């Protein structure tokens, strides 16, 4: 069944998680090309005094992205969140997502993210303020609760539905869990059972099989994938393949991985400018190649590249050497 939020129908039910410092425009565009049906911006603070920073301006840049443009806002003051929603809509947002999923205690010095889940009345005030301030769909991303002894996601889901929220994402951990332990999906299942809203299941989905398992178990309408996409952005293609055919996807050929990585690096240089782009590219290179033994031998040299052309030359050499190594091992 197609996945829909308000008037928007998505190409599939695979969502790239918002990840601050990761899911910038070049990363979102790559994941879309590799099979994600929906992407969300990195969170944008609701504080108006930070709107003019270069960081916020780049986070608000969606030019060339396929719609609907989904912008996540973070903050703990209802009127400020309502104002931030209006401001982002004036700047192109077509869906507003409210962040109650981030484990950081404070986002910009006020309680925000999943810390809010402790104060159910404040949650309700924020949701009502934002929904009544705008005419576009508003969605909510949350965790399963404040702590393991206080998993209140179902209670908040009811409140969200009552306030006019149009979809819910649930990460299967509590705020107290941070990223420790394993995500649990029973609470997500309960949320789906208890409300009529579209539910997106999230947490530790790191393979096509796991994606199928989580969808079947929770009955969620869609699944959201975060950290594994940093290492394997082609995971979306693989999950799509598995959901459609039931057969295990092959690992993409190195030639394809190289082309995707180079394309991504070129987009980073164009988006951030060469100086910053080369530096931001380093973490993406590490995430994608970091599990490879040969990469770890040449990593120090590769990390020293300071221009786009040096970095691209090093990447080409890495993939060429790797092909030779594979050939040597095989012969
Ligand atoms: C580096 C990083 C940054 C994140 N930033 C955000 C964010 O801005 N907003 C948000 O709602 N969640 C954020 N998250 C949480 C993810 O969206 C997701 O819920 C979490 O990583 C679990 O999914 P996964 O196991 O597939 O990674 C972040 C996670 C990571 C690792």
Image: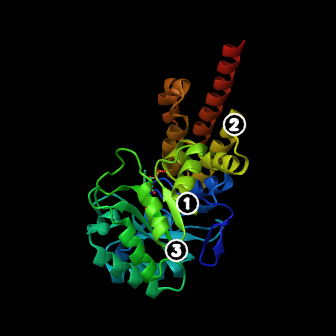
Q: Are marks 1 and 2 in contact (CB under 8 Å)?
A: no
Quadrant housing the C terminus: top right
Gap in Å between the C-alphas at discs 3 and 2?
36 Å
Q: Look at the numbered disc 1 and give the secondary structure of its residue.
A: loop
Residue 4 versus residue 232 in the image, above or below: below
Identify the residue at image location x=64%, y=74%: 8
Q: Position of residue 250 (x, y in %)?
A: 69, 36
Q: Position of residue 124 (x, y in %)?
A: 35, 79
Q: Are marks 3 and 2 in contact (CB under 8 Å)?
A: no
Q: Position of residue 68 (x, y in %)?
A: 62, 71
- The residue pinned by badge 1 equals 219
Gap in Å between the C-alphas at discs 1 and 2?
26 Å
- In the image, taking residue 82 as reference, residue 266 lies left or right, namely right
Q: First in sequence: mark 3 or mark 2? A: 3
Question: Label 1: few (<14), some or many (≥20) within 10 Å?
Answer: some
Q: Quadrant of ligand 1?
A: bottom left
Identify the residue at image location x=51%, y=48%: 205
Q: How many marks?
A: 3
Residue 326 versus residue 284 in the image, above or below: above
Q: First in sequence: mark 1 or mark 2? A: 1
Q: Position of residue 92 (x, y in %)?
A: 57, 76
Q: Look at the numbered disc 3 and give the secondary structure of its residue.
A: loop
Q: Which mark is residue 196?
A: 3
Residue 296 visible at all: yes
- In the image, taking residue 293 as reference, residue 249 lies left or right, namely right
């Amino acid at each position: 069944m197609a996945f829909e939020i308000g008037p928007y129908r998505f190409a599939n039910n695979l969502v790239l998680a918002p990840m601050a410092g990761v899911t910038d425009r070049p990363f979102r565009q790559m994941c879309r090309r590799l099979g994600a049906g929906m992407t969300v911006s990195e969170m944008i603070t609701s504080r108006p005094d930070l709107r003019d920073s270069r960081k916020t301006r780049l986070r608000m840049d969606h030019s060339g992205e396929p719609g609907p443009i989904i912008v996540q806002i973070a903050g703990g003051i209802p009127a400020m969140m309502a104002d931030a929603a209006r401001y982002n809509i004036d700047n192109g947002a077509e869906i507003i997502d409210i962040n109650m999923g981030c484990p950081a205690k404070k986002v910009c010095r006020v309680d925000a993210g999943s810390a809010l889940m402790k104060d159910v009345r404040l949650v309700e005030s924020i949701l009502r303020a934002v929904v009544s301030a705008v005419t576009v769909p508003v969605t909510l991303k949350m965790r399963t609760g404040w702590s393991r002894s206080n998993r209140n996601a179902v209670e908040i889901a009811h409140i969200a539905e009552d306030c006019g929220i149009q979809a819910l994402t649930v990460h299967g951990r509590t705020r107290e869990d941070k990223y420790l332990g394993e995500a649990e999906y029973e609470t997500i299942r309960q949320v789906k059972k208890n409300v009529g809203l579209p539910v997106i299941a999230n947490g530790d989905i790191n393979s096509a099989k796991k994606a199928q398992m989580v969808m079947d178990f929770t009955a969620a309408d869609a699944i959201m994938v975060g950290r594994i996409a940093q290492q394997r952005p082609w995971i979306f293609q693989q999950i799509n393949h598995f959901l459609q055919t039931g057969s295990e996807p092959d690992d993409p050929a190195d030639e394809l991985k190289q082309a995707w990585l180079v394309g991504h690096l070129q987009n980073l240089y164009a988006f951030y400018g060469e100086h910053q782009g080369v530096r931001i590219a380093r973490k993406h290179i590490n995430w994608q190649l970091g599990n490879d033994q040969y990469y770890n031998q040449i990593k120090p040299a590769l990390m020293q590249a300071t221009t786009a052309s040096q970095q691209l030359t090093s990447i080409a050499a890495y993939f060429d050497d790797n092909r030779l190594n594979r050939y040597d091992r095989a012969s």
